[in-house]
Amino acid sequence: MKFVFYTHSLVSDWNHGNAHFLRGVMRDLVRRGHSALALEPVDAWSRMNLLETQGQAAIDRFATDFPELESRQYGSDFDHESALVDSDVVVVHEWTEPALVEQIGRIRAGGANFTLLFHDTHHRAVSAEDDIAGLQLRDYDGVLAFGETLRQRYLDAGWGRQVFTWHEAADDALFHPMPEIERREDLIWIGNWGDNERTAEISEFLIEPAAALQLSGTIRGVRYPEEAIAAVKRAGLHYGGWIANADAPKAFAAHKVTMHIPRRPYVQSLPGIPTIRVFEALACGIPLLSAPWEDAENLFRPGKDFLFAQNGTEMQRLLREVIEDPDLGRDIAASGLETILARHTCRHRVDELLGILGQVGTARVTQHLDDLETTP
């Protein structure tokens, strides 16, 4: 089948976590013999920032890191109808311009034979409700929401015909343990600043415990204000700025522990959505400590796959225990990796996507799926 994904960007992962997941999904589709194409706007905010801050080399890396993937840019004169004429499945991400979301729906309603899905991987349904409510989704065959609470939000509001939970996951072809790399440093956190959505939490769960324990370590991410960078340095940690997601597994492998600090909208309004960094870290076999969030869908085994810290004092204690007891760290890491490989890889999500298409797909897609089942 031919899959087309409208995304904010596939090429750039600068402050754009959806690129991580989409690359993994597309790579698995290609491995299974499908065709996968990404379409991204020529003026994508993430790509423009990557180019401005890191230069053309960072853009060029995409083709080197992911040679099997294809992305094309579109501008105001792009012929979307022609681009989609031979598509079987079209998935439109929620950062796509509203007018284009509606236009693609009209193409589908006008007799196009592709299956059309809308994909939401953000908290705007609760933090900017009017933006999502204003989208025209009546001609979409289904909605993919990256958490059950978000799915319920769509259902309660009457957005979309059918809504399915489709969590993010780790591309385990990229994210996997690297035991050959020595864990020389204590702590790593890979996370963007987040528009003040977790400023206090970063201080309480990361900066203050690291300073108190005099840990070595690294902070990677973008959009940190100068005062935040200064606080990181005062804590004795190194601020490294942007990191290509393809380099994250090596970075995890060189450290003894990492952590998850969720953004406030997820904790308060969308429980059960851990975002992709948790999946990726656990896939790399590094012990994970987490600030509070509710695993409402039982995705993991808290206390076994990772450890919760309810406050900064508890985080400090857990950091000390994991760093000083390598056996404890290895047990947590092994358990987390086990859960990822059993339930949360991009291979699992492609299986789920094909199952969803079996429910809402056009006759052409259904025939493709039947052919796949009968292929020896």
Image (cartoon, rainbow, N blue to C red):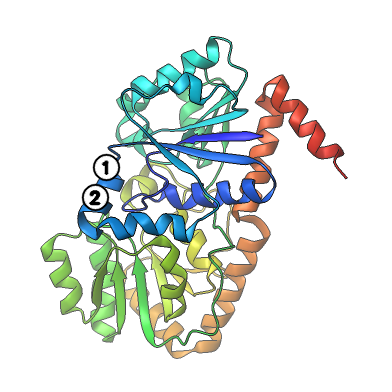
Above or below, comparing residue 187 to residue 109 in the picture: below
Q: Which residue is mark 2?
A: 49
* Viewer-proximal residue among 42 and 307: 42
* Viewer-proximal residue among 249 and 332: 249
Mark 1 and mark 2: Cα distance apart in space: 6 Å
Above or below, comparing residue 151 to residue 313 in the picture: above
Q: Which residue is mark 1?
A: 45
Q: Residues within 10 Å of mark 1 (few under 14, many from 20)?
A: some
Residue 104 in picture, x, y percent from top left? 46, 20
Secondary structure, mark 2, is: helix
Callout 1 touching callout 2 (CB < 8 Å): yes
Q: Is residue 70 left or right of residue 15?
A: right
The residue under label 2 is which amino acid type?
Answer: Asn
Above or below, comparing residue 63 to residue 217 in the picture: above
Which residue is pictured at 75% across the width and 31% down the height?
A: 368
* Viewer-proximal residue among 288 and 176: 176
Which residue is pictured at 34% across the width and 27% down the height?
A: 97
Quadrant where the N terminus is found in the figure: top right
The image's mark for residue 187 is none
The residue under label 1 is which amino acid type?
Answer: Trp
* Viewer-proximal residue among 301 and 40: 40
Q: Residues within 10 Å of mark 2 (few under 14, many from 20)?
A: some
Secondary structure, mark 1, is: helix
Quarter assignment of residue 170:
bottom right
Quadrant where the C terminus is found in the figure: top right
Residue 167 in picture, x, y percent from top left? 54, 46
Q: Is residue 181 visible?
A: yes
Q: Residue furthest top?
A: 110
Residue 110 in picture, x, y percent from top left? 53, 9
Quarter assignment of residue 242:
bottom left
Q: How many marks?
A: 2
Residue 374 in picture, x, y percent from top left? 86, 38
